[in-house]
Amino acid sequence: MHELRVLIDADACPRQALAIAQGLCREFGWNCFTYASFNHQLRGENHITVDAGPQAVDMKLANDTRAGDIVVTQDIGLAALILGKKAASLTPHGTIFDPERITFHLEERNEKARFRRGGGRTRGPAARTREDDQRFEEALRFLMKKRGGESD
């Protein structure tokens, strides 16, 4: 059996979501790996620090991902790469990326970027709520159980 792992794009992961993921990994006996640029000064037993170059964290995380892993990221492009490797991906808000809808998410992201390049403004993310924490915990717990990490 392969190692059960949750990999977290910690550059943009809220602290609450990071703490929830680490707690669930302890509960289920999974390994939790965090990835961030050295600008974020995170530390830990399974923390991987990369340089601050554009997409450096995403590329390292994508290269390290194996089939069966679960990856926490807000980056839709990274999620698409992860799904292509037969791993699961979800946002810190609890949205599970579905392989059948990832193309829609990529197209939506591109349309918003085109709009912004043309001078338009789009809304930023809403403030994090307890409901976001609960939704994230439920979604991650669901994926961990689905991938073989039943807790006692």
Image: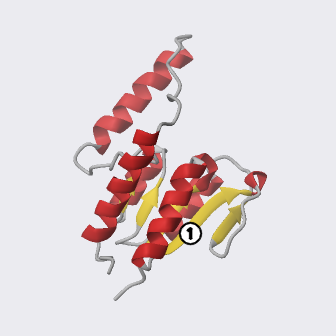
Q: Residue at x 47, y 16 (%)?
A: 115
| Quadrant that contains the N terminus | bottom left
Mark 1 secondary-structure assignment: strand
Q: Is residue 39 above or below residue 141?
A: above
Residue 8 picture location, percent across and down? 53, 60
Residue holding disc 1: 33
Q: Amino acid at mark 1?
A: Phe
The one nearer the camera, 33 or 61, is 33
The one nearer the camera, 70 or 152, is 152
Q: Is residue 12 above or below residue 44?
A: above
Q: Residue at x 35, y 65 (%)?
A: 87
User: What's the coloring here?
Assistant: secondary structure
Residue 86 in the figure: left or right of residue 60: left
Dot 1: within a 10 Å radius of its alpha carbon, few (fewer than 14), some, or many (20 or more) residues? many
Q: Quadrant of residue 71?
A: bottom left
Q: Is residue 27 above or below residue 73?
A: below
